[in-house]
C-alpha cells in the first residue's frame, strides 16, 4: 500500500515536471519588443512599428536616415536588446546585412506609410535556420461614429 502511494506520487511529480518544462524546451525564440503575431514550434513572426524601430536603433526613421537605420539593424546587439537570443539576433542582423536593397525598400516603405510595420520571421528547424524580413500593413479599425437619435440612416438608391 505504501509503495503504491509512493509510485503514484512519483508519477504525478514526473508528469508535472514534464508538462512544466515543455514550454521552455520548445520556445527558444523570445522577443520583448514588437508584437508576436505567430509562434509555432519552428517559426516565430514578430511585427515592429516605426516607433519601436526608432527606439531600438536610437535614430529617427525617415528618407534621409534610411542607410543609418539599416546599418544599426545589421548589429546583433540591437536584436538582443529587442529580446532575441544571440543565435536568432545574429540571423536577423545577417539578413539586414546581406539584403541591402530589400532592407532599404522595407525601411523606405515604413517611413512613407505610418500603417506599415517591419515583419521579422525567424525559422529554426532542426537542419535549417533563417530570418526573413518584410512589411505588414497594420490597419487600425475605424470606430463607428455616434449620431444623434433624430437622424435616420441613409437609404441606398441602387
Image (cartoon, helix red, strand yellow):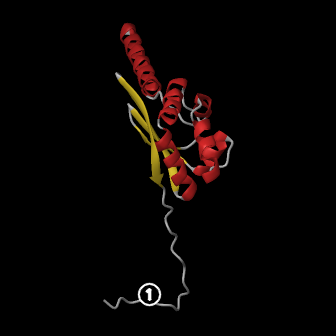
Work out whether residue 32 or residue 133 is closer to the camera in this orientation and state it.
133
Image coordinates for residue 55, horizontal then vertical, percent: 66, 44
Quadrant for the C terminus, please. Answer: bottom left
Characterize the local packing of mark 1: few (<14), some (14-19) or many (20 or more) Cα atoms within 10 angstroms. Answer: few
**Above or below: residue 9 compared with residue 68:** above
Of residue 19 and residue 42, the one placed in the foreground of this image is 42
Instruction: Give the mark count.
Output: 1
**Res. 62 in view:** no
Q: Residue furthest right?
A: 58
Residue 152 x %, y %: 46, 90
Return the x and y of residue 28 as percentages of the image width and height.
47, 27
Which residue is at the far top?
A: 3
| Picture residue at 48% right of the left edge, 43% below the top | 101
Residue drawn at the location 38% of the way across and 16% of the way down: 11
Q: Nearer the viewer, residue 74 or 139?
A: 74
Mark 1 lies on a secondary structure that is: loop
Quarter that holds the N terminus: top left
| Lateral position of residue 128 relative to residue 152, left or right | left
Left or right position of 51 against 14 = right
Residue 128 visible here: yes
State whether residue 71 is above or below residue 5.
below
In this view, the residue in front, 31 or 13, is: 31
Report which residue position mark 1 lands on: 153
| Residue 3 x, y percent position in the rendering | 38, 7
Q: Is residue 65 above or below residue 125?
A: below
Q: Residue at x 54, y 79 (%)?
A: 146
Amino acid at each position: 500500500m505504501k509503495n503504491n502511494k509512493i509510485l503514484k506520487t512519483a508519477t504525478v511529480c514526473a508528469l508535472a515536471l514534464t508538462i512544466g518544462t515543455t514550454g521552455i524546451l520548445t520556445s527558444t525564440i523570445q522577443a520583448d519588443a514588437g508584437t508576436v503575431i505567430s509562434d509555432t514550434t519552428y517559426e516565430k513572426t514578430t511585427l515592429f512599428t516605426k516607433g519601436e524601430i526608432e527606439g531600438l536603433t536610437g535614430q529617427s526613421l525617415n528618407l534621409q536616415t534610411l542607410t543609418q537605420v539599416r546599418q544599426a539593424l545589421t548589429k546583433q546587439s540591437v536584436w538582443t536588446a529587442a529580446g532575441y537570443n544571440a543565435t536568432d539576433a545574429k540571423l536577423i542582423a545577417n539578413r539586414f546585412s546581406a539584403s541591402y536593397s530589400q532592407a532599404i525598400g522595407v525601411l523606405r516603405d515604413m517611413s512613407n506609410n505610418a500603417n506599415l510595420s517591419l515583419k521579422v520571421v525567424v525559422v529554426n528547424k532542426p537542419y535549417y535556420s533563417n530570418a526573413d524580413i518584410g512589411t505588414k500593413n497594420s490597419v487600425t479599425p475605424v470606430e463607428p461614429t455616434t449620431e444623434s437619435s433624430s437622424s435616420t440612416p441613409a437609404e441606398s438608391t441602387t
